[in-house]
Image (cartoon, rainbow, N blue to C red):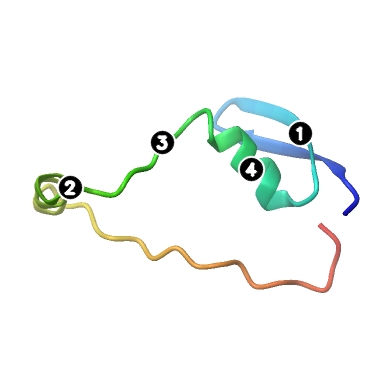
Amino acid sequence: MSQRVYLVKGGDQVRLVKASTKAQAVGFVARNMFSASVAKQDELIEALTSGKTVEIAQEEPATASAE
């Protein structure tokens, strides 16, 4: 797959990332900004009682246009 240079923006940061897809470019940048793990029961209770909601992550639909 060919690669392009993507402009990835977040807050006041701007990064240029060479990647095969937009998702790969964003993922590369996000990897250094966020972490993820399976939530423990106590963490779920604390987050839900403080007003957080569960967000549903889904694959982005494929588009015919180039990214």
Residue under the point 60% across and 43% down:
27
Residue under the point 56% across and 67% down:
59
- Could you tell me the amino acid type at mark 1? Val
Q: CA distance from mark 2 to mark 4?
A: 27 Å
Looking at the rendered structure, the secondary structure element under dot 1 is strand
Looking at the rendered structure, the secondary structure element under dot 4 is helix
Image x and y of residue 67, in percent: 81, 57
Label 3 CA crowd tier, 10 Å (few <14, some 14–19, many 20+): few
Q: CA distance from mark 4 to mark 1?
A: 8 Å
- Could you tell me the amino acid type at mark 2? Lys
Q: Which residue is mark 2?
A: 40
* Numbered badge on residue 50: none
* Numbered badge on residue 17: 1
* Numbered badge on residue 26: 4
Quadrant (top left/top right/bottom left/bottom right) for the N terminus: bottom right
Q: CA distance from mark 2 to mark 3?
A: 15 Å
* Pointer 3 or 1: first along the chain: 1
Label 2 CA crowd tier, 10 Å (few <14, some 14–19, many 20+): few
Residue under the point 28% across and 60% down:
54
Between disc 2 and disc 1, the foreground one is 2
Looking at the rendered structure, the secondary structure element under dot 2 is loop
Between disc 3 and disc 4, the foreground one is 3
